[in-house]
Amino acid sequence: MLRLDGREPTLENIRTYQAEKLGRFNGNTLLTELMPIPKPKVKRWGYDELIPQFATREEYYRVVKPRRIEYLRALLTEHRPNVVVCYGKAFWGDYRQLFEGTVFEQEGQFQTAAFDDTQVILTGHFAARSMNGRFDELATIIQHTTQRI
């Protein structure tokens, strides 16, 4: 986002943006997870006592994921964002379900598609080594998208 605003992604600018703008009410970004319960490890569940109706991660995904996808699709339809960035390569299959029927194309290490008027970009996790040095490439894809809109 800093690159899109023409600002240098220095540590200070990143921290300020995260603290003051990222995902804030009346801002220009929404930061959400596909699945609403955070987990420190993808494969670990650990919520069996806190949420006993879901004894396993698989049960939680089976019940909650279709509802969550429906909810997020409704948000996309209502707000019609210019760009959606889905990060975390392990979840690309889940993200594709959110944009059902959409054909993705490989663009460098990213996959991109048009979903109605929204440009969708699938990328690796932002903290992954594969993203080192790739944020300019991602910003360029987003800039080309917003220039067409």
Image (spheres, helix red, strand yellow):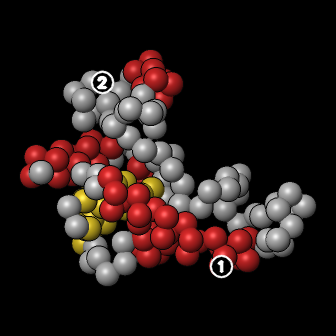
Say which residue label 1 marks.
62
Relative to residue 149, is residue 62 drawn left or right?
right
Q: Is residue 110 above or below residue 139?
A: below
Q: Is residue 101 above or below residue 85?
A: below
Which residue is situated farthest in the top direction here? 12
Relative to residue 87, is residue 66 drawn left or right?
right
Number of callouts = 2
Question: Which residue corresponds to the image point at 59% horizontal and 61% vertical from the top-left?
Answer: 35
Relative to residue 25, is residue 80 drawn left or right?
left
Relative to residue 144, is residue 105 drawn left or right?
right
SS under mark 1: helix
- Viewport quadrant of the N terminus: top left
Say which residue label 2 marks.
8
Task: Say whether residue 89 is visible.
Answer: no
Task: Say whether residue 15 is visible.
Answer: yes
Viewer-nearest residue: 133 or 94: 94
Dot 2 or dot 1: first in sequence order is 2
Q: Is residue 33 above or below residue 57?
A: above
Which residue is situated farthest in the left direction here? 148
Viewer-nearest residue: 5 or 139: 5
Q: Position of residue 63 (x, y in %)?
A: 66, 76
* The quadrant where residue 39 appears: bottom right
**Local crowd at mark 1 within 10 Å, few (<14), some, or many (≥20)?**
few
Question: Which residue corresponds to the image point at 38% horizontal and 40% vertical from the top-left?
Answer: 29
Question: Which residue corresponds to the image point at 22% horizontal and 67% vertical from the top-left?
Answer: 116
SS under mark 2: loop
Question: Which residue corresponds to the image point at 34% horizontal and 57% vertical from the top-left?
Answer: 78
Which residue is situated farthest in the bottom direction here? 101
Task: Please name the amino acid that badge 2 sits on.
Answer: Glu
